[in-house]
Image (tube, rainbow, N blue to C red):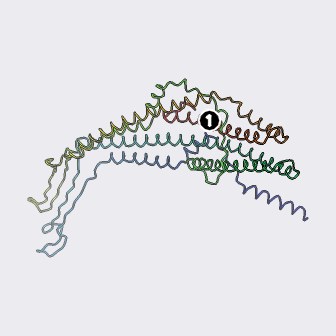
Amino acid sequence: MKRPLILTGFLLLGLILKGNAQDSLKLSLPEAEKMFIAGNYELIAQQYQTEQAKAEIITARLFDNPEISYENQLYNRETKKFFQHTLPSGQYNVQVSQLIKLAGKRNKNIQLAHTGVKLAEYAYFDLIRTLRYQLRSNFYKAYYAQQSALVYQQQIKSLEQLLAASEQQLKMGNVALKDIIRIKSLLYNLKGEYTSLLNEIEDAETTLKMMCNIKADTPLSLVAPRADEQDYSLQKQPLMQLLESARANRADLQLAQSSITQAENNLSLQKAMAIPDVELSLVYDLQGSAPNHYTGLGIKVPLPLFNRNQGEIKKAKIAITAGNMNLKQQEATLENEVYNSYKSALRTEILYQGMDRNFGSDFSRLIGEVTKNFRSRNISLVEFIDFYDSYKESTLQLNQLKYEWMNAKEEINYVTGSNIFK
């Protein structure tokens, strides 16, 4: 009886430990983008800004409420009574008024509110463009850094095994102490660099988790299929075509253009505000006027002698001029960003296409042979360390080049506001 109970206890303990162990989240770039669109707080907040702008349209469509006023006699000295409101001694006055806006102010307010919605929508699209580039850039940065971390792990494990074997040889007098010290020094340097690289990976993954709304303590295992590393040719994309795509799709440029439209609509509204509105009123007076039961129709119109809304009209005109200057600046910025990204991507593409695709795998097989030869004393420690450093640096540079190559593609998409390269 005891033995089955003990086995059952171990089984339950294993299940508990397995449940408590947190598996890493395998995350591909398409999956990260879905999580980003669905759960990014900045995007959600900007969506609320758009909804607020739409609510302004509802407000602009509303008519002014009518006003009603009522006045009653407080105290009658003759009858010594309060609030008399009937004949022959009572008195009250009722007035209903309605403001009527002229010069199309209501329609102009509606147009201005619609422009505000456009501005909010373009701001949302531009935020998506910026954040998506940050997401994809950080994803590739973290992914290739993880690939570099695997190189450090392999080298550290291999050197630790070599160090253990060399220390055994030292006891037998087959290895000099200085060689052990050199191996330890190389191992410590590798561990130090590995720790710094892990910190960089953690920073990049933290950004990814925040952008995708992933729990902070979730380990990430990034997956970049080979399909993501297919060749693309930037030379087949003329610079002028990229500029045209940017002018058509960049939300920040459309935002600047819509700002001018908003300023023009505001100028039209402010000119209309200089025209006075009319207030119509209907009055009933019990006996305060001659004759009793007086009913009157009134009209009230301000005379535009002093205030003709000159200040707001001038501000609206200045806003149009400033908007045109901002648009020219935005167009110049767009052209320079596209040109700079295009030239940088071309240089990266030429460098990447000139790289031997089998370089990494060939070097990995060679490092194993070098380690065996060093253990067999066919090569010296200096040669071994030199080759180890060359292997590490070459592999890190290769991963960095891959990252720059993928990031150059994403930067072209970013500056053009479109998916030139998928």
Whole-percent x and y of residue 366?
Answer: 77, 35
Find numbered disc 1 in the image and state the secondary structure of the residue it sits on: helix
Bin the neighbour count of mark 1 within 10 Å (Cα to Cα): few under 14, some 14-19, many 20 and up. some
Q: Is residue 254 above or below residue 174?
A: above
Toward the viewer: 296 or 162?
Answer: 162
Residue at 40% from the left image edge and 40% from the top image edge:
118
Toward the viewer: 260 or 226?
Answer: 226
Position of residue 271 in the picture relative to residue 159 (left or right): left
Quadrant of residue 403 in the image? top right
Q: Quadrant of the C terminus?
A: top right
Q: Quadrant of the N terminus?
A: bottom right
Residue identifier under label 1: 401
Quadrant of residue 410 in the image? top right
Q: Is residue 180 above or below residue 83?
A: above
Quadrant of residue 329 in the image? top left
Residue at 22% from the left image edge and 43% from the top image edge:
102
Whole-percent x and y of residue 274?
Answer: 20, 44
Total labels: the figure holds 1
Whole-percent x and y of residue 41?
Answer: 52, 50
Name the residue type under label 1: Leu
